[in-house]
Image (spheres, rainbow, N blue to C red):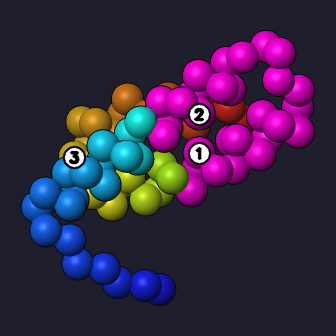
Amino acid sequence: MLGMMFTEKECKEFDYLLRKEMDEMLLDMSDRRLDGPVKEAISKRYKIIFRMYARIAPPRELTRYAVGLKSQR
């Protein structure tokens, strides 16, 4: 395990980066032009980033992105 300390500003930036990355992956996973293996790779990466986001996000925000986990199973 790796520990990191962030300032408040850095934490907000990290939050922003994770949310934007998840938004992009959700968009990619809804693209019908992508085939199974590509979507599976995106889905695995999404789960990792979601777990990172879950450590810093309020529960209310998590529900927005947890939908992406359920729809990709």
Q: Are marks 1 and 2 in contact (CB under 8 Å)?
A: yes
Instruction: Choose mark 2 or mark 3, whichever is in front.
Output: 2
Asked whether 35 falls inside the magenta stretch, the response is yes
Residue nearer the viewer, 60 or 18: 18
Q: Residue 62 location, x and y as percent?
A: 34, 40
Magenta residues span 21-48
Above-or-below relation of 56 to 66: below
What amino acid type is highlighted by mark number 1?
Tyr
Q: Provide residue 53's location: percent of width, then percent of height.
A: 38, 52
List the residue tagged with mark 2.
25
Prevailing secondary structure class for the magenta stretch in the rendered image? helix
Q: Residue furthest top?
A: 32
Q: Secondary structure at mark 2?
A: helix
Q: Nearer the viewer, mark 3 or mark 1?
A: 1
The answer to which of marks 1 and 2 sits earlier in the sequence is 2
SS state under label 3: loop
10 Å crowding of disc 2: few (<14), some (14-19), many (20+): some
Q: Amino acid at mark 3?
A: Pro
The answer to whether one can see residue 70 in this image is: no
- Taking 27 as reference, is 50 left or right? left
- Compute the Cα span from label 2 to label 3: 21 Å
Q: On the image, numbered disc 1 is attached to which residue?
A: 46
Q: Give the quarter of the image for residue 61.
A: top left
The label on residue 58 is 3
Query: Which label belongs to residue 57?
Result: none
Q: Residue at x 11, y 61 (%)?
A: 8
Residue in the picture at 20% in, 71% down = 6
